[in-house]
Amino acid sequence: MNWKHGFIGAALLCALLPFALPQYMLTIVVEALIFGLLAMSLDLMVGYCRLYSFGHAAAYGLGAYACGMLLKHFALPLPIGILLAVAITVVIAIPIAWICTRSTGVSFAMLTLAFAQLGYAMLYRFKEITGGSDGIDGIPRPPGPFNIAWFESKLGYYYLVLFCLLGSYLLCRAIVRSPFGTVLAAIRENEVKARSLGYNTRRYKLATVVLAYGFGALAGALYAPFAGFASPELFFWLTSGRVLIMVVVGGAGTLVGPILGGGAFLILENELSQLTDSWPLIFGTIFIAFVMFAPQGIWGLITGRFGRSAIAASAARTEEAPDAAA
Amino acid sequence: MDFLGFAATQCLNALSQASVLFFIACGLTLIFGIMRVINFAHGVIFMLGAYVGYTASAVSGSFLLSLVVAPIVVGIVGMVFERVFLHRLYRRRDPGAYLMVTFGLAVVVSEAIRLIWGTQPLGTGIPDFLRGIVLVLGQPFPLYRLFLIALGISAAVAIWQFLDRTRAGLLIRAVSQNAEMVQALGTDIDLVRTGVFGFGCALAALGGALAAPLVTAFLGMGTTVVIDAFVVVIVGGMGSFLGSIIGSVLIAFVQVVGAYYFQELALAFMYLLMLAVLVVRPGGLLGKEE
């Protein structure tokens, strides 16, 4: 099966999904798609550069707050608000990425975490603008272009989110398969070697972080008008941790895996938290099990017969030849 | 108000906070030095120490006994975790895997605490013999905080002597410099790793049991403190013992001064300091750049 068939099939399935679901499920499905997009954006860093960001909540939160404020105070059309929010986040992300890519590994994780927490702290500092612990509420969801009452309805918004997700996926897929993406894979496998081949690896990593922030901001910008509010929670480090879990459980370095992981995580959480109090206990255990026994994630398990996900294969190679590891 | 007395009590306040931070950060940095593992669960381990300490002192009626029981129990939990999970990941050489498996542990343990002890905050209460108030330059200061400072300083000295003077300390320093060489020379480094992980967890648990009378044990006490401890370790330098002392004192002072003079910026202050340090010295004040 060609990937194009798979993609078109999945897109059609998603397009028809709302008609098979009860109305109340639509809200959670939209959120699942948004989280899938967020997880996929983080996968650019984790799966293709081995840059473990513990602060991806910053991208999500920035996108959500920027979009929320733009829509609320300037009454912009929705698509323009979303695109502007992404642009703003990308501009903010450049200096952040510049500082964070100075280090790798654990320090990188901690630096990204620090920036996200700094953003969290700033929300409280500039209460007048950000609403402090209340966040921003009453974010409008303006109708679509030409005054068609399109995005106002849940169904219309579902298609907007689906369109963004599929478009982003195609874009990311093209990125990781381009010559640029090949260099990223080289960095993931052995950065020293990539550098000695003459690549300025830091510039590549910087670009990846900025890209990941951009797509993460798109997820945030889609979330704010849908939920109608943006709260400091979006910036909190637990959000970052959750997204990272989704990437790993879904399958890092596959793009599709994190989308599935993000969606499945959110829907499972929604269903199970109604059944049992101890949902965190269950998902913590599942998560540990995946890290220990199936680092290739859900998507890697599914496609296991045909091929291994890149990062799992790389982990396996490292195990086989420990000396090659940097 | 008498400024000198005020300044003195504020300094002591910061030092007592530094003691608690040190107990967490020291274990964190030792564990990192030995196995390059960032233990995300360290804050939850600290919280577990506070809860176990609460139960121990409630059952036995002795606060001092709880300071012994909590580290032992939690240290054993840590060693079991290291043996069962982390141990299998060393071969993968992927720092992300450690980060994530300990994040999973943090989620599971904090949920387990909620199931065992419930959601109510539990106050240990300061034991009678430490309850008094001392006058420092004419200003009242709680005796318990002085006790914390004394304990923090003596622990720091004891650990420093242990690392510097004993054979086990020598081994720990050697493993953190070059684990493969130590193994080639015939030392069971798995034992060292398990031991250090358990020791680090025990220290955090002691910190938790000590902090419990001040803040009462509550769910979520681990999450704020682990971020503080990360900042301490990063500012001081990953894997550096002396760095964890300097970092604890520095961060505690920033927190106390920030909370008093710049209330709105207090949270941001710490992160700004960390960013400033990292931009100038990516490896932290006393750390090596990797």
Image: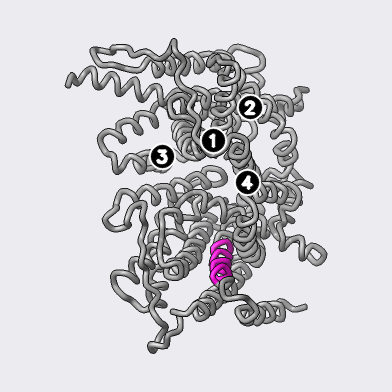
Q: How many marks?
A: 4
Whether label 1 touches label 2, CB < 8 Å: no
Q: Earlier in the sequence, mark 4 or mark 3?
A: 4
Q: Label 1: how many residues lie within 10 Å, few (<14), some (14-19) or many (20+)?
A: many
Q: Are marks 4 and 3 on the same chain?
A: yes
Q: Earlier in the sequence, mark 2 or mark 3?
A: 2
Left/right placement of residue A146 relative to residue B189 reads left
Q: Disc 1 designates what residue?
A: B43
Whether label 3 touches label 1, CB < 8 Å: no
Q: Secondary structure at mark 2?
A: helix
Is residue A273 among the parts visible in the rendering? yes
Label 1 – label 2 distance at C-alpha: 12 Å
Label 3 – label 1 distance at C-alpha: 19 Å
Label 4 – label 2 distance at C-alpha: 20 Å
Answer above or below: position of A322 versus A14.
above
Q: Chain of mark 4?
A: B
Q: Disc 4 designates what residue?
A: B100
Specify start and end residues of the magenta stretch as a single range: A27-40
